[in-house]
Image (cartoon, rainbow, N blue to C red):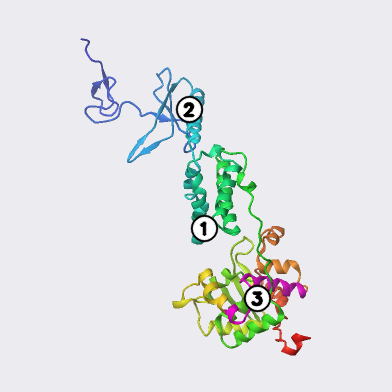
Amino acid sequence: MAAPEYAKCPKCKKLTVDGASYCAYCGKRLVPLPRRVRPRTEGQGTITKLSDDRAKPYWARLPAEYDNLHVQRRSIGCYKTYKEAAEALAKAMYVEQESAQRGLTLGDLYEGFIETKYFAQLTPQSQAGHRNSWRDLQAAAKVPVKQINRDTLQQIIDTAEKRGLKRETLAKIRNLASMLCREAMAKGLLTVNYGQFVQLPRSDSKPVQPFSSNEIAMIWEAADSGDKTAQAVILLIYTGLRPGELLSMRIEENLHITGRNRYLRGGSKTEAGRNRIIPLPPVVHPVIDALVDGREDGYLIPADGGKRYDLNNWRNRCYNKLMARLKLEGHTPYSCRHTYADLQKRRRVSPEIMMEVMGHTDYSTTVENYHTTTDEDIDILCDAVSEMTRPQAKKKDEKER
């Protein structure tokens, strides 16, 4: 048996067995650690250069896989040059990805979608809406994504229609299907958004009708009597706010009084609708005062206990009851917004001002998401609505003529 060879430790200068990883006396590491070369993007695998005396020093491994508390990196092999290692790693990752995507189902795609940053930033109502839509799309949860086509999605919509779902609900299902198709396109699984080709049944709903002058006068009478719902409806008619936007307005955050001008600042839904100026015509200033009622904070239209009104609850418990009492059935809360647009159109207010106040997306595109901020611009918007008045109710003999 050959006698072992010794080498001197560079730290303590004592002799230790040649080739040992550590010095037996001082513990200094004698063999250098493998070093990574050319840092790679996360998820692209690892290439590590081992000792230089190897014939194939470049060690390629797939991205890390986590199993409970353990980290595993599957080895591809060692290669003579970095280029050879990178090519082998890219090929191995392509095979792995193809194998994984081949078995990726629509259900897997949905589970990934609800974990995205986009989904996390949605309102709780929107998230709940997507989850409700998934209940119908779930029929195709086990279908591989690469086998999804228009017919697959159309069959789901047709089945949901036979169950009696309304067109609006079917549109939400199609919208989610379209989102999932876009996710699949981003992953390279589909080349076409099949969701956009799904056909919905024809709409048999009647167009939204604005309130007439006589109907507005009837609502004014109810508002003058102290009816809070009627006061809220008057604000919707004279501001063009979406019902959900008005219910979210807070006194301390959204109501502003600067000199002769009063306005709300807020909004939602579209990019153009957020954080916009909504001027309050002088004719509704008494209504604002009645709703505020000396409060300095809280919702402008509060529910019981000062909480925020849910739109559906407000529509069913307040708005519909008011319409029934005034015998104005057939008008939805959105009739108020249509009435505002109709009133401003009759007064020949410029489309640009109307779109700015109402928060329409088309105007946002035209002026690159501009929002009014200066006092001069606020004056322009407030002046545009300053001459809005309340109509007088017609007498019975005038109606008969």
**Callout 1, which amino acid?**
Gly
Q: Is residue 227 above or below residue 361?
A: below
Estimate the spatial distance between the alpha carbons at disc 2 and disc 1, rounded to whole Å: 40 Å
Q: Nearer the viewer, mark 3 or mark 1?
A: 1
Estimate the spatial distance between the alpha carbons at disc 2 and disc 3, rounded to whole Å: 63 Å
| Label 2 environment density (alpha carbons within 10 Å; few <14, some 14–19, many ≥20) | some
Numbered disc 2: secondary structure: helix
Q: Quadrant of residue 16?
A: top left
Numbered disc 1: secondary structure: helix
Number of marks present in the image shown: 3
Left or right of 360 on screen, residue 297: left
Q: Quadrant of residue 377?
A: bottom right
Residue where numbered disc 2 is placed: 92
Q: Which residues are magenta?
A: 322-347
> Which label number is shown at residue 129?
1
**Callout 2, which amino acid?**
Ala
Numbered disc 3: secondary structure: helix
Q: Is residue 155 visible?
A: yes
> Which label number is shown at residue 206?
none
Residue 239 x/y as whole percent: 65, 74
Determine if the magenta segment contains residue 328.
yes
Determine if the magenta segment contains residue 123.
no
| Label 1 environment density (alpha carbons within 10 Å; few <14, some 14–19, many ≥20) | some
Residue where numbered disc 3 is placed: 237
Q: Quadrant of the N terminus?
A: top left
